[in-house]
Amino acid sequence: MIFEELPTEPIYTLAMDVPSSWLVRPRESLYDLDNIQLTHLLPEDDSVKAVFALDALIIAGHARETGTQSPPRGVQLQLVKAGQSTPIQDTLVVANLGYFQFRVAPGVYGLEIREGRGRQIFAMDSVGGLGWESPSVEEAGNEIAVTSFEGLTLYPRLKRQEGMEGEDVLAEPEGKEPTVLENLSSKYVPSLAGSIAG
């Protein structure tokens, strides 16, 4: 696209207006595309040129707990290549509407809860690939497919493991062994405070 006879005094910005599921960024440009000053171009340039590239598509979604419909904040989700177990990307479910996001290329992936406290408390009930009332993992599996440039929106349901009804993913588990730093601070900080006060 070419724009001619623009006034030279204003500061311009050059960006792409793309779908929200695209992650696009400039690949080639001699100038700062957020602060283009036409009066400060190199002598040999009479225009600003830029090449943009589509870096990734976005898988976004809103996770919720089965039953309460509340966001399982702090749960880490991960993507694995279909048929493999090594994670290729992970993300955190935030408290605000249970939002999460992955940046991917087109392909087939498995959606899982990452190993750790999240998996101790929750199990994947549904990956939510077919909307709010998607079938369970037992019925449809945990695979999702990014097959178009429209990205993908998921609505996963997570169910609590038996006996974990009152647990918080972000809280420290009871009976956890203290770290070396916690041991040192509990041993020396009170004595330091006492010597400073005395």
Image (cartoon, rainbow, N blue to C red):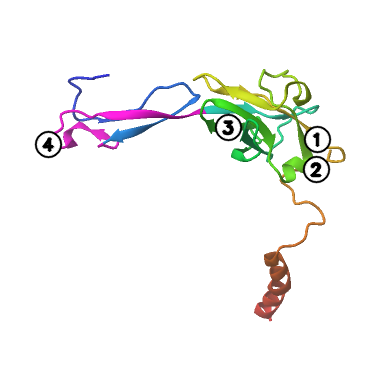
Q: Is residue 29 visible?
A: yes
Q: Which residue is mark 1?
A: 160
Q: Which residue is mark 2?
A: 167
The quadrant of the picture occupied by the N terminus is: top left
Which amino acid lies under the numbered mark 4 shown in the image of this protein? Pro
Kindly report the distance in space between the C-alpha atoms of the residues bearing marks 1 and 2.
9 Å
Q: Which residue is mark 4?
A: 43
Q: Which residue is mark 3?
A: 101
Q: Of label 2 and label 3, which has the lower sequence position?
A: 3
Q: Is residue 34 visible?
A: no
Which amino acid lies under the numbered mark 1 shown in the image of this protein? Arg
* Number of other residues with Cα within 10 Å of mark 3, as a class: few under 14, some 14 to 19, many 20 or more: some
Which span is picked out in magenta? 30-57
> Is 122 left, or right, of 89 in this rendering?
right
Kindly report the distance in space between the C-alpha atoms of the residues bearing marks 4 and 2.
65 Å
Which amino acid lies under the numbered mark 3 shown in the image of this protein? Gln
Which secondary structure lies at badge 3? Answer: strand
* Number of other residues with Cα within 10 Å of mark 4, as a class: few under 14, some 14 to 19, many 20 or more: few
Kindly report the distance in space between the C-alpha atoms of the residues bearing marks 1 and 3.
22 Å
Q: Of label 3 and label 4, which has the lower sequence position?
A: 4
For marks 2 and 3, give the one nearer the viewer: 3
Kindly report the distance in space between the C-alpha atoms of the residues bearing marks 4 and 1.
65 Å
Which residue: 87% across, 40% down?
Answer: 163
Q: Position of residue 168 (x, y in %)?
A: 76, 43
Marks 4 & 2, CB-CB < 8 Å contact: no
> Is 185 a magenta residue?
no
Q: Position of residue 159 (x, y in %)?
A: 79, 32
Q: Of label 4 and label 2, which has the lower sequence position?
A: 4
Which secondary structure lies at badge 2? Answer: loop
